[in-house]
Image: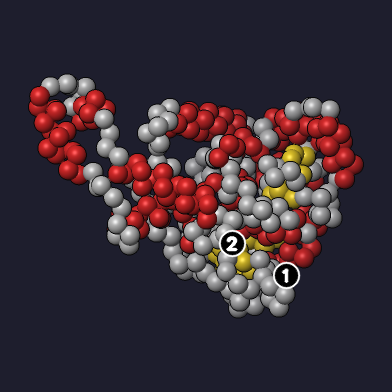
């Protein structure tokens, strides 16, 4: 049975209502393999390795140019200066905006739509216009993030505008300045879209460098403003009507996996190095089969573990979370790498597995 995750921290809940995102840093969800699809794990691993190798090569190129420091994971002084020049010319990107942004280039968006109507591929559309269409059909562009600076601690009465400098972001979405900021326990972050009587809010845990988490949560704020697919939380995956079907499907899949013993030949390969013998057969019958549960009792520890794993899987596959995780990944990439590789190169879930809840 694959290793399973610990439960997430209790989510922060500001006055505006329940958060739509809970980012547990260092706790990447595990997608248990499906025994009916033996190539699934290898395919996912190969895809992940391909993307990882590509991005590593791009960052290595920046390091060779003296623009990136692998030891700190941040731009060098020369890289920061270079980024400043790129930002001034609009060539370096990060957070994803949409047509509602005040700085959106609507002419280029129109061109992107025309190219899409002619059957031009998204890579070419991206390199020509800087726009791409998300899986739910909404168009996006990237807003420069390298000019972002965390300028103050989060305290009573803090807003996003009081704790960061981010000219490009606030030019695009001036109302983001008023997002309330809170400190939360742990090392993650959460976004609450607010209500009619309370503004949106972001909470950030105690982090040495909160930049990546802030960008992740800011992206959820923009998703809310643009009407795009938003985030989720493992805590609410089973309770949200739009996510419950995916949760139940994953739960049943995992429960079936746990209660279905592997064939003897597979067990012999895994535990006996492929040895087919009376000894391995006896071990299979007398030891292994006795460890396989015949059912998953409700409220048992096994039931709880399967629920947690199913909820993590659903959370990970919601496209709003995929998009928000993409934002901090693209920091430090050269403009050439960004132009050559659209944001989908940084998506960490295969597109066929996206969950796109209806708004």
Please give the residue where the numbered disc 2 appears in the rendered image. 20
Question: At 57% across and 65% down in the image, what residue appears?
Answer: 19
Please say if 10 is above or below 123: below
In front here: 147 or 157? 157
In the rendered image, residue 280, in percent from the top left (x then y), is placed at: 14, 27
Mark 1 and mark 2 lie on one chain; the one further toward the N terminus is 2
Please give left or right for residue 194 compared with residue 52 in the image.
right
Q: Can residue 55 be seen from the camera position used here?
A: yes
Q: Position of residue 350 (x, y in %)?
A: 56, 36
Q: Nearer the viewer, mark 1 or mark 2?
A: 2
SS at mark 2?
loop
Q: Mark 1 = which residue?
A: 178
Tell me the crowding category of disc 1: few under 14, some 14 to 19, or many 20 or more residues within 10 angstroms, Cα based. some
Where in the figure is residue 80, as x and y percent of width and height?
67, 45
Q: Which mark is residue 346?
A: none
For the N terminus, the image quarter is top left
């Amino acid at each position: 049975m694959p290793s399973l995750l610990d439960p997430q921290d209790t989510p922060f809940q500001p006055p505006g209502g329940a958060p739509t995102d809970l980012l547990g840093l260092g706790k990447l969800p595990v997608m248990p393999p499906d025994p009916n699809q033996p190539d699934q794990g290898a395919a996912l691993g190969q895809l992940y390795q391909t993307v990882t190798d590509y991005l590593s090569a791009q960052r290595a190129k920046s390091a060779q140019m003296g623009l990136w420091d692998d030891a700190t994971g941040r731009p060098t002084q020369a890289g920061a200066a270079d980024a400043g020049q790129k930002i001034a010319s609009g060539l370096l990107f990060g957070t994803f905006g949409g047509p509602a942004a005040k700085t959106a280039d609507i002419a280029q968006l129109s061109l992107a739509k025309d190219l899409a109507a002619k059957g031009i591929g998204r890579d070419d559309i991206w390199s020509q216009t800087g726009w791409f269409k998300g899986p739910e059909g909404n168009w996006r562009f990237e807003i420069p993030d390298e000019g972002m600076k965390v300028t103050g601690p989060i305290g009573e009465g803090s807003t996003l505008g009081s704790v960061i400098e981010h000219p490009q972001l606030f030019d695009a979405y001036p109302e983001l300045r008023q997002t309330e900021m809170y400190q939360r326990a742990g090392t993650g972050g959460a976004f609450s879209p607010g209500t009619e009587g309370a503004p949106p809010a972001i909470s950030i845990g105690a982090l040495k460098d909160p930049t990546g988490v802030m960008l992740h949560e800011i992206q959820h704020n923009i998703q809310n403003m643009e009407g795009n697919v938003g985030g989720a939380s493992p805590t609410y995956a089973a309770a949200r009507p739009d996510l419950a079907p995916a949760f139940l499907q994953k739960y049943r899949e995992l429960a079936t996996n746990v209660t279905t013993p592997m064939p003897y030949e597979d067990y012999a390969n895994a535990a006996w190095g492929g040895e087919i013998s009376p000894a391995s057969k006896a071990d299979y019958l007398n030891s292994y089969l006795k460890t396989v549960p015949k059912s998953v009792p409700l409220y048992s520890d096994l039931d709880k573990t399967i629920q947690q794993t199913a909820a993590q899987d659903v959370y990970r596959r919601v496209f709003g979370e995929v998009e928000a995780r993409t934002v901090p990944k693209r920091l430090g990439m050269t403009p050439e790498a960004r132009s050559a590789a659209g944001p989908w190169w940084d998506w960490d879930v295969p597109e066929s597995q996206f969950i796109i809840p209806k708004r």
